[in-house]
Image (tube, grey):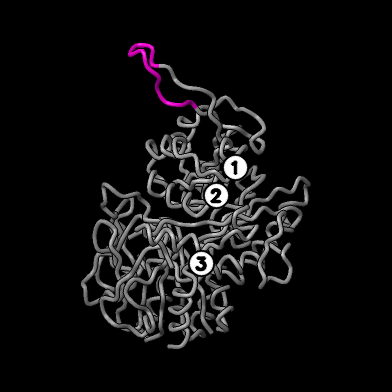
Amino acid sequence: MIAIIDYGAGNLFSVHNALSFLGFENRVTSDPSVLHAANKLILPGVGAFPDAMGRLRAMGLDRTICQEAQAGKPLLGICLGMQLLFEKGYEFTETEGLSLIEGYVDKIIAPDLKIPHMGWDEVEVVNPSPLTKGIVDGDMVYFVHSYKAVTAVSNIRLATQYGQLVPALVEKGNVFGAQFHPEKSSAVGLKILNAFGDL
Amino acid sequence: MLAKRVIPCLDVKDGKVVKGINFVNIQDVGDPVECAIEYNRQGADEIVFLDITATHERRGTMADVVFRTAENVFIPLTVGGGIRTPNDFRELLNAGADKVSVNSAAVYDANIISEAAYRFGSQCVVVAIDARCVGVEEDAENARYGKSKYHVYTEGGRKDSGLDMVEWAKKAESLGAGEILLTSMDTDGTKKGFDLEMLRAVCEVVRIPVIASGGGGDLSSFVEVFKETDVDAALAASVFHYGEYIVEDVKHVMKEAGIPVRI
């Protein structure tokens, strides 16, 4: 069973729908015992970094997520959920993240481009990953974000260019993060969710 | 490179598509869910549902359409038509919509934009503007004609609000709109091409994405709107409804013209 972590941050049902469509048993939950019983975790989220971290802490879910991830359970953060995996975020104010992957989250600086980076954009394969089986350079996925992760290239699996390199998929051991929305990225996104479900 | 988006729009009344789609692989041409699945298969980048139901039971019916579509279609879904309150946003987002578009209600009370942006995030707040040319600004000092003047219309394009389109677009952005869906009442339904001049007037003053609507005709009209203006997306209803060509055909001519698209 895949647990989709509910901490009051946005549309969890698209992730639920996509997993159900692919045939993976899944539950939207904020119950730590369900997160413990699950064999994989997904941390979704839209909104702002400080608010989201505040909610996770207030619900005690930050510790649960870290314990489960450190015990080796596969964890996939999506969009803001991916950003929370890093050590720090600089949205509005400096905020500590879950620190499961080294790096930080900062504004996209692209004076000539529209912010947020919204829409379908190409990815390129930077490093191979079990999640990117069947994904090739030029495949398109759906992004909606104004902040990006800054992390070592060894953690980056897929990247896009938006005035600068923007990590699209990151991975550190059993911890994965997608800056785009695989649940809204049609066939390409479903491939990635399917690979996560099959881990 | 960020792809330019092609967005089919489905007009829905009482849970049924208003104009049937002439697709061979659809069983029930009136079912918005089946139509959305077909558009997804054709390569639509997003789908817009426009609710034109006039009764009070509308919201529940539309939420059900969105709910069933979201179980089967994994691209962004936008819903508009008759949105009056932030709670309307919540109901449709909970049903699986990714964005909600607000039109007349925002003209009457612009606070709905900022409230919805604050509660649900700018990314899901689309401000739909129906506009029409109402004359030309005269530049008396230089004894020459200036730009065309446009007014915002409400109630499905029936009522002149008196608001200046360019000012309204700027205000919508400043209140937290994440996107503008701009329909030209002058070109809507003509199939003679998008209203390039009107679209440029808005693209020049906002930094949020603009969706062109009204006038989509032959395949070249899509190439034209992306070549001649800075819009991010083009929306059309009837050209896709009547199966004159499919979304994939539009993408191919765009690609041949060197416009970045998702194929």
Residue B261: quadrant of the picture: bottom left
Q: Label 1, secondary structure: give it.
A: loop
Residue A65 lies in quadrant: bottom left
Q: Which residues are magenta?
A: B139-149
Asked whether the residues under the numbered discs 3 and 1 touch, taking CB atoms below 8 Å apart as contact, a structural biologist would say no
Q: Which residue is mark 2?
A: B217
Quadrant occupied by the C terminus of chain A: bottom left
Q: Main secondary structure of the magenta part?
A: strand
Kindly report which numbered mark, 3 or 1, lies closer to the viewer in this rendering.
1
Q: Chain of mark 2?
A: B
Can residue A42 be seen in this snapshot?
Answer: yes
- Dot 2: what SS? loop
Provide the secondary structure element on which disc 3 rests: loop
Q: CA distance from mark 2 to mark 1?
A: 8 Å
- Report whether mark 2 lies on the same chain as mark 1: yes
- The residue at the point 57 percent across, 35 percent down is B186
Frontmost residue, A8 versus A196: A196
**Disc nearer the start of the sequence (2/1):** 1
N-terminal-most mark, 3 or 2: 3
Q: Which chain does the numbered disc 1 sit on? A: B
Residue B148 drawn in magenta: yes
Taking B258 as reference, is B73 left or right?
Answer: right
- Magenta segment includes A137: no
Q: Give the label on residue B190, or none.
A: 1
For residue B53, side relative to residue A132 (left or right): right
Residue labelled with disc 3: B43
Q: Nearer the viewer, residue A85 or B148?
A: B148
